[in-house]
């Protein structure tokens, strides 16, 4: 596609230049003439433009089991496409379709043999008022394997129907403008959400808040770009208002600050989506694997009195206070001649570098109740250069059941005097102190992830961050180019807008022309 445009001499051409005839005057509505096939842009370029901006032709009708696989009380089978109505008539044996979006009880037959497959509920969703924007049906049948298999086979024998590819229903919803890319991603996250916080964030994104934010930014950039393009093309005609470029500069500056603030969110949305990485670390025989098993409520790691039992990283996914956690147990940190254990220690150090929160575990009976001793022991666990008081860390003093009376209080007091991270006494053997640990960990998780319903929506995908960072770079280069070459400055605005469009899935050159003709009196 890019090659076709390049061959026609039109690759990366601004829309206002793409549609300019040799005489130099702009033709109002030319872009629409391109789409109607009446464009002066002909040949390969015309075909590429039409393929880019014209809707796809008539599609197949697809069907699939939408509910989970396996035995269940009710299974939902969906169809989408132009033959959905005919398929529903064939399966029910009735020529009259049910009222739109109303549940109807019908016998469901195999059209090839007239055999009754089941008695269930059917719903008719005529397009465009459906999930995909096409004609859709839903069959709510009993969830036995034989029933579901029979209905799917009957649908597969109907002309014009085929099994759906993975995600094809949602893909059609996107292609038909029912969902933006961020909403599609939110729907996927909602399906896979395992905690309350994940559900809230995914639902907010699926309902369009994140997409609306990016779309607003895209509209502001579109308007700024249209004004710059108009200034380049028509400033000599004295048909433009004064101060156009000053207003563009102010708008770009405000947008740049807003995008930068959005990026500086501490990766809250990404952490909440993928899970907060909590690493259990400490010297050998401190009780790290016991702590993992205690928090998981199952024997996830091998426990023994032999130092260096854990050689590799053991992971477990947890829900703590409604936040997703990926909990990792690591090898005990010590100098060793054993090659395998040395590799385990190396992996533990690497995992600590990537940790969001560290549970630094020490045996309470092995440390003196002095701030300096506790700080040195903690410093030996944390990555180099990270001050103990600033680390995203919880100090866990394990084996509290072995302490002499009064020593636990002395240890906690020493931690308070030394300005160390939040500390708790714990006994993995008796379970004493686990509630205190979970409270401290819940506080850390809340600080890292925040409230997904509060404030502006957070970006949730690495690709969002990548495109927003590129967008911010283009906005910064716009300021550098505007005093040297306004055409290059406009190109940076176009690139910034393109990066935003890649997040939402909406990139259109026609919008720029709409604003040019709407906001300026060009060629009147």
Image (spheres, rainbow, N blue to C red):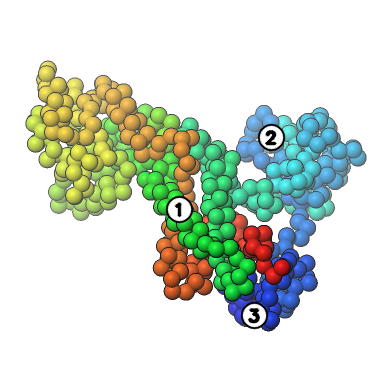
Residue at the (43%, 46%) spot, across then down: 270
Tag 2 and tag 1, C-beta contact below 8 Å? no
475 left or right, relative to 190: left
Residue 379 visible here: yes
Residue at the (81%, 30%) spot, across then down: 104
Element on which disc 3 rests: loop
In front here: 479 or 199?
Answer: 479
Element on which disc 2 rests: strand
- Name the spot of residue 507 as percent of width and height, x first: 60, 60
As measured in the structure, the alpha-carbon distance from the residue carrying label 3 to the one carrying label 2 is 53 Å
| Residue wearing tag 1 | 254
Query: Pointer 2: residues within 10 angstroms few (<14), some, or many (20+)?
Result: many
Query: Pointer 1: residues within 10 angstroms few (<14), some, or many (20+)?
Result: few
- Can you tell which quarter of the image residue 519 is in? bottom right
- Can you tell which quarter of the image residue 136 is in? top right
- Name the spot of residue 51 as percent of width and height, x first: 70, 67
352 left or right, relative to 117: left
Q: Nearer the viewer, mark 1 or mark 3?
A: 1
Element on which disc 1 rests: helix
Q: Earlier in the sequence, mark 2 or mark 1?
A: 2
In front here: 493 or 107?
Answer: 493
Q: Is residue 266 above or below residue 396?
A: below
- Name the spot of residue 47 as percent of width and height, x first: 71, 73
Image quadrant for the N terminus?
bottom right
In front here: 437 or 229?
Answer: 229
As measured in the structure, the alpha-carbon distance from the residue carrying label 1 to the one carrying label 3 is 37 Å
| Residue wearing tag 3 | 8
Residue at the (86%, 41%) spot, across then down: 89
Q: Is residue 181 above or below residue 326?
A: below
């Amino acid at each position: 596609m890019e090659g076709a445009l390049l061959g026609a001499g039109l690759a990366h051409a601004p829309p206002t230049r793409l549609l300019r005839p040799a005489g130099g005057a702009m033709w109002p509505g030319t872009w629409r003439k391109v789409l109607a096939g009446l464009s002066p842009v002909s040949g390969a370029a015309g075909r590429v433009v039409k393929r880019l901006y014209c809707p796809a032709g008539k599609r197949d009708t697809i069907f699939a089991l939408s509910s989970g696989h396996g035995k269940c009380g009710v299974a939902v089978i969906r169809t989408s496409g132009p033959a959905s109505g005919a398929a529903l008539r064939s399966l029910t044996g009735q020529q009259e379709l049910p009222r739109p979006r109303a549940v109807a009880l019908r016998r469901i037959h195999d059209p090839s043999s007239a055999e009754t497959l089941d008695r269930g509920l059917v719903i008719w969703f005529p397009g465009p008022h459906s999930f995909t924007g096409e004609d859709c049906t839903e069959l709510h049948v009993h969830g036995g394997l034989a029933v579901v298999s029979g209905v799917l086979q009957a649908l597969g024998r109907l002309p014009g129907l085929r099994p759906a590819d993975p995600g094809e229903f949602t893909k059609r919803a996107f292609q038909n403008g029912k969902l933006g890319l961020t909403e599609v991603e939110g729907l996927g996250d909602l399906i896979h959400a395992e905690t309350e916080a994940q559900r809230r964030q995914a639902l907010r994104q699926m309902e369009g808040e994140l997409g609306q934010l990016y779309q607003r930014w895209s509209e502001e950039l579109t308007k700024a770009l249209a004004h710059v393009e108009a200034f380049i093309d028509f400033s000599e005609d004295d048909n433009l208002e004064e101060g156009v470029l000053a207003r563009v500069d102010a708008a770009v500056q405000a947008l740049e600050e807003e995008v930068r603030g959005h990026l500086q969110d501490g990766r809250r949305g990404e952490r909440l989506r993928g899970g907060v990485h909590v690493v259990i670390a400490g010297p050998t025989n401190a009780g790290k694997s016991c702590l993992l098993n205690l928090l998981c409520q199952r024997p996830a790691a091998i426990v023994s009195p032999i130092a260096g039992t854990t050689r590799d990283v053991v992971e477990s996914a947890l829900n703590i206070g409604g936040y997703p956690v990926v909990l990792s147990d690591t090898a005990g940190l010590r100098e060793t001649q054993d090659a395998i254990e040395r590799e385990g220690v190396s992996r533990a150090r690497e995992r600590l570098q990537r940790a969001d929160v560290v549970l630094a575990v020490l045996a309470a009976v092995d440390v003196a109740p002095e701030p300096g001793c506790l700080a040195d022991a903690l410093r030996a666990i944390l990555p180099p250069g990270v001050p103990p008081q600033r680390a995203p860390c919880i100090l866990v003093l394990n084996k509290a059941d072995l302490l002499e009376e009064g020593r636990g209080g002395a240890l906690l007091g020493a931690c308070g005097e030394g300005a160390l991270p939040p500390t708790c006494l714990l006994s993995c053997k008796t379970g004493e102190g686990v509630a205190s640990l979970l409270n401290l960990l819940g506080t850390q998780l809340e600080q890292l992830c925040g409230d997904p319903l509060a404030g502006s929506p957070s970006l949730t995908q690495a690709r969002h961050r990548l495109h927003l960072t590129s967008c911010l770079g283009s906005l910064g280069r716009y300021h550098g180019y505007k005093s040297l070459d306004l055409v290059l400055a406009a190109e940076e605005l176009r690139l910034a807008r393109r990066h935003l469009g890649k997040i939402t899935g909406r990139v259109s050159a026609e919008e720029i022309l709409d604003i040019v003709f709407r906001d300026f009196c060009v060629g009147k």
